[in-house]
Amino acid sequence: MQLFAGPYPEFSRETQRNTIATRLEHEFEKVYGRPPSTEEARSWRNSLGKIRDVFEEALLEDNGVILEFQLPFYSGRLDCLVTGQSPTGIDSGLIVELKQWETVRPTEGENEVETWIGGENRDVLHPSVQVSRYKEYLKDLHSAFSGEGAPSLSSCVYLHNYRRERAEPLLDSKFSAFLADSPVYLSDQFDALVGRCRSLVGGGDGLPLLERIEAGKEIATRAFLDHVASAIRGTPDFHLLDEQQVAHDTVMSHVRRATEAPGKSAIIVEGGPGSGKSLIAINLLATLAGGTEGRARYLAHYVTGSRAFTRTLRTKLGPRMERLFKWTNSYSEAEADGVPVLLVDEAHRIRPVTTNRFGRPTRPNPPPQVEEILRAGRVSVFFIDDLQTVTPTDAGSTTGIRAAAERLGIPVRSIRLEGQFRCGGSGGFVQWVESVLGLRQGPVVRWENTDLFEFRIVDSPEELDTLVRTKAGEGRSARLVAGFCWPWSKARKDGVLPEDVRIGSFARPWNAREEATHLPKGIPKASLWAYSPGGLNQIGCVYTAQGFEFDYVGVIFGNDLQYDVEAGGWTGHPERNYDPMVKRSGERFLELVKRTYRVLLTRGIRGCFVHFIDPDTRDYVRSRISEPMGSSEA
């Protein structure tokens, strides 16, 4: 999908008459059901005339121009793609990323710089990194750029407002590989960009390739599928055991039957914390891409609503894999049955409807987001734990998925995972947590510590922090997490994180916000807090911890959930909670905050240490332990 595609003379005429931006605005509203942002419309008015001047000087009279070309199943769009032939007659496309930037600052990020955007300074991908990945995305996943006779595809960046003396951060040596692949042209390099356009697409005859691109569809090249399979299989963290392998094989056999016959199908894989849902999903991604024993290969998307979990996987598996990791909101405009298999992990994070970054629906009268996903995939596999819905906007549930599939006439198969590969392999600990929190029916059971899993109640946050750091110092993965009972302030201008979590003399910062800038070296953003060694120095909340596991987890159990001894039950206190969505959830607050602590308490593989702010709550939980090992009273 694109907002404009046509011959260069048409683009040039409309740009010269100042009508091209208005045309794009009208097309945008027709496609997305809403007007573009003021910033986006301004960028069209400011940048398209600049690139038109370049094309005019390069004499690109017989070329095609595509503007705002949306990548398959991704919200990102190419600014400008010009088609033509090289002077030697080879079909060729050139992607030009247009930026209005005037200032850039360096950052510690491997692929990022800082610039003023959206009303504030933000860390963003270096434009050469951005456009290089767009180019590889198209080569891997768009039919017009693959197979025999595929055209050449190149990319570059034009910062038409950027003066050369400010260029040092953009030309830093850490970006050298990307700069060589996708050069940056500044305001005083007009002639150099003209020369690049002539050398790549100056031969004209660009309309046949433009039509080929418009008629193209998402595919997966053999080379890309080989990369997917080898990247995952070469990662030792992703091995399956026992019923995980059985579930994997069951899904694979179902996928093969479903994709080789007419119709659609859905599979629900249910399992609690540590049952291996994500491991199965990742391995399925590899198996589907690689094929086995001469079997067919399948393109699959790994879909989740968890930002931290998705970005960590992208980092771990490498940038080329990014194109297969999607958000649940990626399918509002998707073609029906456009993807053979959708692997929807953390399916409890599915939202009621798809919205834009301002929280508004992406189109009038939107269908439920789960229906968009079901329509887009030929086979949709949902990995879910109903008790991990922790906000009012978490709309994923087994009953909801079944109901949506029934409305669409899609049969559903269920797989239940009973094994436990976390908490020392003890499903009993998870059941005990659910029992103590009142999330499981029946009498409250007692927990007995074993050599396989260590549970301790500690009397101070300092002791909790020391335990976590000691385990980390022994080479174990360990993190400190807390209920959302303190404000989460923005980083200071110098990047230092405020120590928001304060308990007496104890003070620690929350993990950094995703949009934080000028962070000192070693401080990760929220999406990498669980993965980066620097995350040990900040406290994570449910949103940064959900989906991850650590050898040891330390939990600060806040005052938003307390056990009332006189009433003999749990009480919720939204006035002590700082999560804006949850504290306004009304009657759902108590259930949601119970689920939040269930998530936090079940992140550990070998042990869990807890400090309770409220003494009555501490004493009640301690009374449900047969051997209160590790407490200060023991």
Image (tube, grey):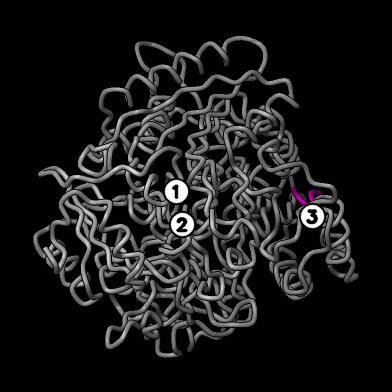
Q: Which residue is mark 3?
A: 8
Of the numbered discs 1 and 3, the one sitting upstream in the chain is 3
Quarter of the image for residue 247 reads top left
Q: Callout 3: helix, strand or loop?
A: helix
Q: Which mark is residue 536?
A: none
The spot of residue 110 in percent (x, y) is 35, 67
Mark 3 residue crowding within 10 angstroms, few (<14) / some (14–19) / many (20+): many
Q: Which residue is mark 2?
A: 569
Amino acid bearing label 3:
Tyr
Quarter of the image for residue 618 reads bottom left
Q: Nearer the viewer, residue 114 or 65?
A: 114
The spot of residue 173 in percent (x, y) is 33, 72
Q: Name the residue rendered at 38%, 57% in the picture.
A: 545
On screen, 417 above or below 213? above
Q: Is residue 179 visible?
A: no
Q: Which residue is mark 1?
A: 438
Q: Nearer the viewer, residue 381 or 625?
A: 625
Q: Nearer the viewer, mark 1 or mark 3?
A: 1
Q: Name the residue rendered at 67%, 60% in the picture.
A: 79
The spot of residue 594 in percent (x, y) is 47, 55
Q: Name the residue rendered at 51%, 85% in the picture.
A: 164
